[in-house]
Image (cartoon, rainbow, N blue to C red):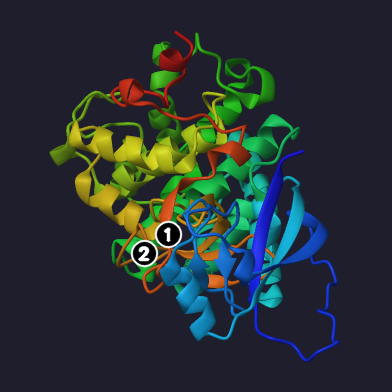
Amino acid sequence: MQRLYDSRLTTPRPHGVQPHRTPNNVQGIMSYNSVHSIETTDLQIGSTLPFVLRDPDGNIVHKSGLPVTQRLLDRLASLGITSVTVKGESQEPINPLETLASSYDPEIFASVENLLEQTTEKFGSIFRDLQNSIPVSSSDINENVSAFVKQIAGDASAVLGVLAIKGKQIGRELSRHLTERAVRMSYFAVANAIGLGYSELDATRVGTLAMLGDVSLLNHPEWFGDNHRILSSVHSLQEYKNHSVESANIVKQNMAFGDGFIESLSQIHELADGSGYPFGLTENRLSEESKIVNLVDTYLSMTEGGITGRHYLECDVLAFIMHQSSLGKFDKRVVRGFIKTFSLYPIGVLVKLDDNSFAVVTRTNPRNPFQPVVKCCDSTGRVKDLSVSMNFIVGPATETIPSRERINKSQMGDLLWLPDTVFA
């Protein structure tokens, strides 16, 4: 089993007093099984250390793999440090979601979780009524969406953290699956809208649009295969390409929304360069709210495997979306708002820092999407705001996330969010 090392520098202790050597247990991350000390006088100049040296406060003094220098020894001496306590540890799987869950106020977490469940139950009932052509009050939907608009406006990071922890549910019936996805679509679209500066009223409209965009799919269970993925053969069908129009007609016939809302609903699968469906409309003919929903749909399709069956790494998907934006597929302003809201390393993603440690993204930084707030996956559990920390992200912790696929440069121009492209 691979041996890892974490070290703490110690100052002199009174003669005869032995160091406290109680093992640290980090649930779900790693467990220590040996502790020993190295005197600083035994550190040889030019030798390399297979562990990071930290001071008692957890600050890095010397990085793993770098040679010992006279300057390092002089620094240790000036600090009064005479020995290094080395903790050998056996590596266990890191559970980033446990670390993420511990980052939020339990009351806030429970409140968001309860609203998510209540909203899903409520919309399950609404969708069944729409499927059966039973009129539904538009205020019922707006009130529910408005509730999590206020939640996101209050603490977007906590809401997105709960969504990351809850994840996509497996093994549910199709109607429940589509309802849950609609709710997640709505949450993400609202967050994007708020990031773009929308008022609560306008963000509610965007969230409602995202909620209803794919309601017509309930009428077509034959389009779905295993794990509720849309069959590759279906995507080329004209009837499938018209499903946003079908959704718009269902809403128009059974709810009291204006013509502008209905038109936006029919546009949510259009692309800015005119290559979307069903009408092939170009950017200047599309509402911004439909562009937001389209982008969120693409992101969730690629990261949650709801349509393609592929689970791509979140930061790769964001890089992919930015590249596709440069090709004219997505509106640049909407993409910038999405990156600002979700960061290049979205909440819940496990990352590797420059000192080879692992951390989980817990909050975004709207001023710099490269520098979110992270929580370390070690015994310290330190929270670091990378906008002011000396540490930085070197990339996603891909070796710990085998279930996620990477997107290489040759794939950046492909339409990876469409079933017929993925399965061709």
- Circle count: 2
Residue 78's x, y, as percent? Answer: 49, 85
| Secondary structure found at label 2 | helix
Residue 281's x, y, as percent? Answer: 20, 30
| Secondary structure found at label 1 | helix
Circle 1: residue type: Ala
Front-lying residue, 99 or 233: 99
Establish if 318 lies above or below 108.
above
Quarter of the figure with the N terminus? top right
Q: Which residue is mark 2?
A: 194
Residue depicted at x 43% and y 64%:
391
Tell me the CA gap for discs 1 and 2: 5 Å
Q: Residue 205, can we see it?
A: no
At label 2, counting other C-alpha atoms closer than 10 Å, the crowd grade (few under 14, some 14-19, many 20 or more) is many
Establish if 61 lies above or below 205.
below
Residue depicted at x 43% and y 58%:
190
Q: Residue 93, can we see it?
A: yes
Front-lying residue, 34 or 58: 34
User: Is residue 134 rendered to the left or right of residue 172?
Assistant: left
Residue 185's x, y, as percent? Answer: 50, 46
Circle 2: residue type: Ile
Quadrant assignment, res 147: bottom right
Residues at circles 1 and 2 in contact by the CB criterion of under 8 Å = yes
Residue depicted at x 70% and y 76%:
107
Quarter of the figure with the C terminus? top left
User: Is residue 105 rendered to the left or right of residue 266?
Assistant: right
Residue 345's x, y, as percent? Answer: 44, 52
Establish if 24 lies above or below 56.
above
Q: Which residue is mark 1?
A: 191
